[in-house]
Image: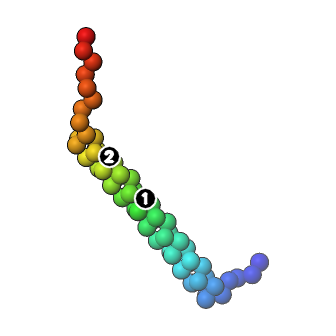
Amino acid sequence: MTVPSLSDYLLSREKISITAARDATHSSARIAHEQLAAAYHARRMAEAPSPPRKQD
């Protein structure tokens, strides 16, 4: 078993933190996009004329 050098260890930790930050950013962006789409849809539904009612 070989022991990784300090520089290899630090580089692997940096890659992990960069990956975690990227994943968190993508997740936040996806959530923000979903919330924006939901708000837009709700606004469109509120502004849309109601469908005509059937006459009995």
**Residue at 35% across, 52% down:** 37
- At mark 1, the secondary structure is helix
Circle 1: is it few (<14), some (14-19), or many (20+) Cα within 10 Å?
Answer: few
User: Residue 36: where, in percent of width, then height?
Assistant: 33, 55
User: Residue 49: where, in percent of width, then height?
Assistant: 23, 36
**Residue at 75% across, 81% down:** 2
Dividing the picture into quadrants, the one containing residue 14 is: bottom right
**Residue at 30% across, 50% down:** 40
Dividing the picture into quadrants, the one containing residue 50 is: top left
Q: Which mark is residue 41?
A: 2
For badge 2, the amino acid type reads His
Q: CA distance from mark 1 to mark 2?
A: 16 Å
Which callout, 1 or 2, points to the residue nearer the camera?
A: 2
Q: Identify whether 14 is placed above or below 31.
A: below
User: Residue 7: where, in percent of width, then height?
Assistant: 61, 89
Of residues 52 and 6, the one nearer the viewer is 52
Q: Which residue is mark 1?
A: 30
Of residues 11 and 42, the one nearer the viewer is 42
Dividing the picture into quadrants, the one containing residue 55 is: top left
For badge 1, the amino acid type reads Arg
| 53 lies left or right of 32 | left
- State how the image is colored: rainbow
Of residues 53 and 26, the one nearer the viewer is 53
Q: Identify whether 48 is placed above or below 15.
A: above
Circle 2: is it few (<14), some (14-19), or many (20+) Cα within 10 Å?
Answer: few
Q: Identify whether 2 is placed above or below 39.
A: below
| 14 lies left or right of 51 | right
Q: Earlier in the sequence, mark 1 or mark 2?
A: 1
User: Residue 30: where, in percent of width, then height?
Assistant: 43, 58
Of residues 2 and 46, the one nearer the viewer is 46
